[in-house]
Image: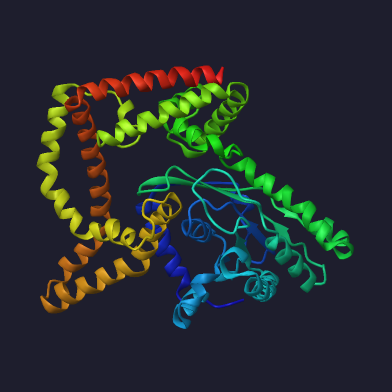
Amino acid sequence: MAKRPGFRLFKHYVRILLDHVMFRKKYVIGEENVPKLGDYCVIPANHQNAAIDPVAMIINMENRTHAYAMAMGGVFTWSPIINKFWDWLGMLPAFRMDFEGVDEAVERTKYVVDFAAEKITEGESVIIFPETNHHVEHWMRVWVVGYLEIAFRAAEKMNFEQDVKIVPMAHHYSSYYGVQGSYLLHYAEPVSLQPYYEQYKKKPRTTIRELNPIIRETVKKMMLYTDDLEHHNLYDFIRKSNVGEEHAKEMGKNPDVLPERLESDQKLWAELEAGVAVNPEIADELTETMKEIQETEKKMLIHEHGGEKKRQSVIRLVLSALAQLALLPLWLFSLIPSAIMYFIPPMFMPGKEDPYYKVYTQSMQFILTIVLLFPIFSITTLLVMGLNWGWWWQAVLWIALWFPLGIFAWYDGLWMRNTWEQISMRIHRNKGKKLQALYHHFYEMVQKLRH
């Protein structure tokens, strides 16, 4: 078993930042199914949120010292020094034909499969994303079967005497952008490969082909999912609107508790899919209304769904604006450290307007913050304020306040945005009335589609 000097401490550091800064709430379903040190397991999962997915899984394995995770092969070509860091983290390269080319992917994959299988025989778990890439929609690509090849290869290395298991797993997030949302890790019951050993010895490819859809279907049932990609954006817009919240309450679910909201959203999407199949013309009208709502909100500089919020009274709006004006100096002060975390990482993202690349933003913010920005900020603060000026306790306090100030900056920024949206609805009175009428019509059409 590989030694990881300092890894456990690093994992605690990352867990604090992930669970209390990047997100405010985490949920783990099926925690009893999480592999323990010494188990022989492969964990295939859906891929919803770039680098956040494997990080969230690894740091929440309380009973383990470590797990290995497959990562895109391209990052292993950057530098030998960086490769040492990936190895310390437990990242294994996944070479994909669509990205690295057929010949290179096939040749290198043979080595990776054997290496990953060896780690399983040592009692380590291997996390793998069979879709081979993340995406922004709530669905899954066709699964490649590498995870089953690794699992059976591990069993073969142990002469088929040990029970290698597959632990299907699904991620879900309240939001893929910004901070202070919620995330959910759902582990299904392990699937034993032992009953398939004899069949595998005779017909390995047939055995793998039979197992792959079973595992994929298990993950599919644990996540928000649709095959109707033509109407995916419409379903997502509906569930994020007041309709989604009201639907959860009708089911007796708390819309602010992510597992309960997921259960409600799954049922809502099933209703919508059934309605679209029967009344496609209503779906077309809803899609056009949705686009008109989005365009109107964009022109009014209102965040998506900002136009459906209840209008505040003039007195409350004035008091809110005065309170924010009073807090403005503190907010500007809080931006001194937090601006680094919020604004610098997205600057390195290609195709900023492309949803495929935009979903990388949260991962970039988190990874760069924990690996570079916060360590550099801390060291610089200690050198300048502590060593140079002799203000040691002030330096430590300033470092300790970095993340609390960043969280304050985020929530105060949201408050300012909500206040502006209320003001915008009053300034653009005609557009505001049009927006409210569009939402009212939208709700009526959704009800028709569901019933």
Would residue 83 be found to the left or right of residue 395 on screen?
right
Image quarter for residue 147?
Answer: bottom right
Would residue 49 be seen by someone viewing this image from the given angle? Answer: yes
Would residue 96 be found to the left or right of residue 20 on screen?
right
As drawn, 377 above or below 424:
below
The percent coordinates of residue 65 (x first, y second) are 55, 67
As drawn, 315 above or below 15:
above
Would residue 408 be found to the left or right of residue 322 on screen?
right
The percent coordinates of residue 301 (x first, y second) are 25, 37
The percent coordinates of residue 404 (x first, y second) are 26, 53
As drawn, 223 above or below 277:
below
Outermost residue, bottom side: 80
Image quarter for residue 291?
Answer: top left
The colour mode here is: rainbow
Would residue 374 be found to the left or right of residue 93 on screen?
left
Q: Residue at x 82, y 67 (%)?
A: 160
Q: Nearer the viewer, residue 408 or 244?
A: 244
Q: Nearer the viewer, residue 312 or 400?
A: 312
Q: Residue at x 47, y 60 (%)?
A: 51
The percent coordinates of residue 62 (x first, y second) are 53, 59
Q: How many marks?
A: 0
Q: Quadrant of the C terminus?
A: top right
As drawn, 48 above or below 269:
below
Would residue 251 be seen by someone viewing this image from the given angle? Answer: no
Q: Quadrant of the N terminus?
A: bottom right
Q: Nearer the viewer, residue 37 or 424?
A: 424
